Image: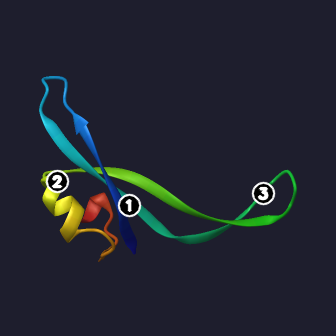
Amino acid sequence: MVTIVDYKQSETSDGKKFYALIVQGGVEMVLNEQTGRYYLTARQASVTSTFNEQTCKGGLSGPNCPERSPESL
């Protein structure tokens, strides 16, 4: 599962505004190859959307989205 944690406004080369959702996965335990010690991390990604700012602000902060691979679309 991923969680929508934020959004970011961007602009295309021709000046049109759009919003990208910042999504974050679950906590992972990763082994540091140099020290041999484990640490916790969570991966983040930015995904473009067609949502307006109002939807990004109020309707999407916090909900979980089911994980889907691009091949399943």
Residue beneath disc 3: 32
Question: Can residue 66 be spotted in the picture?
Answer: no
Residue type for callout 1: Val
Question: Residue 9: x and y, percent?
Answer: 25, 43
Q: Which residue is found at the position 19% from the left and 70% from the top? A: 59
Disc on res. 57: none
What's the residue at 39%, 75% (across, down)?
Answer: 1
The crowding category of the residue bearing disc 3, from other C-alpha atoms within 10 Å (few below 14, some 14 to 19, many at least 20), is few
- Report, in whole angstroms, how far the alpha carbon at label 3 lies from the one at label 2: 39 Å
**Badge number at residue 23:** 1
Kindly identify the residue that appears in the image at 24 percent across and 68 percent down. 60
Of the residues shown, which amino acid type is indicated by label 2?
Answer: Glu
Residue 41 appears in which quarter of the rendering?
bottom right
Left or right: 47 as drawn, with respect to 41: left
- Camera-side residue: 28 or 12? 12
Q: Which of marks 3 and 2 is nearer the N terminus?
A: 3
